[in-house]
């Protein structure tokens, strides 16, 4: 039986250790990490999966923004990372974690503009994420354009720079 609890109920060192096992110790150099640099996760949308008192998975969501080239500012929720204990990968736990976060976002009315960097076949098939609106988005590092995905009625299809949402309050 898997219990889903708020991520802030779990030891942060255990979360970091799981992220290291799932993605490697060099994960901090990735573009997604630079995108959310200096931000705290949105605790209401971030969860841990616990089985037999052991941490087996996590999902975190982050407040970011798209600063349009036209001067506009568009708040977004960055979904991820989704981390699953390597021995438990490919068993559906990652999908359950994403459902937890997206259901919470819907309940809190925070699902209007969500984005992630990930596999379009996976995230598009299950949750409707696509690269349709993201062609003009720039990030603080490299990313394959087809992996920059978004969903929601408030996703801006404009050119601009993605970065941390300074002063974000959820």
Image (tube, grey):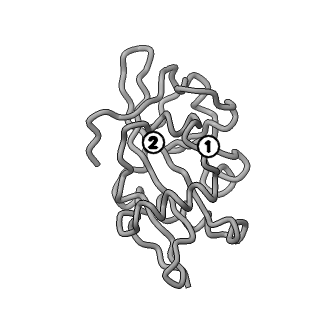
Pointer 2 local density, CA inside 10 Å: few below 14, some 14–19, many at least 20: some
Q: Residue at x 53, y 85 (%)?
A: 52
Pointer 1 local density, CA inside 10 Å: few below 14, some 14–19, many at least 20: few
Q: Residue at x 41, y 60 (%)?
A: 12
- Taking the image as shown, residue 26 lies to the left or right of residue 103, namely right
87 versus 63 height, above or below: below
Q: Where the N terminus falls, by quadrant?
A: bottom right
136 versus 124 height, above or below: above
Counting from the top left corner in percent of width and height, residue 79 is at: 50, 49
Q: Quadrant of residue 20?
A: bottom right
Q: Exactly how many numbered labels are in the figure? A: 2
- Taking the image as shown, residue 43 lies to the left or right of residue 155, namely left
* Secondary structure of the residue carrying numbered label 1: helix
Residue assigned mark 2: 113
Residue assigned mark 1: 26
- Looking at the image, the residue that sits furthest to the top is 70
Q: Label for residue 75?
A: none
163 versus 7 height, above or below: above
């Amino acid at each position: 039986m898997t219990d889903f609890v708020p991520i802030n109920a779990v030891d942060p060192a255990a979360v970091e250790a799981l992220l290291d096992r799932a993605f490697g110790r060099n994960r901090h150099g990735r573009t997604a990490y630079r995108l959310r640099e200096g931000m705290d996760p949105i605790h209401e949308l971030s969860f841990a999966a616990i089985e037999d008192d052991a941490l087996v998975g996590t999902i975190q969501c982050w407040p970011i923004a798209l600063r349009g080239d036209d001067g506009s500012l568009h708040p977004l929720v960055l979904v991820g990372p989704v981390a699953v204990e390597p021995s438990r990968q490919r068993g559906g736990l990652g999908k359950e974690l994403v459902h937890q976060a997206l259901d919470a976002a819907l309940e809190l009315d925070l699902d209007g503009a969500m984005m992630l960097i990930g596999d379009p076949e996976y995230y598009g098939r299950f949750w409707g994420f696509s690269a349709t609106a993201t062609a003009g988005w720039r990030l603080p590092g490299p990313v394959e354009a087809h992996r920059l995905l978004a969903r929601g009625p408030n996703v801006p299809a404009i050119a601009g720079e993605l970065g941390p949402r300074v002063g974000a309050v959820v």
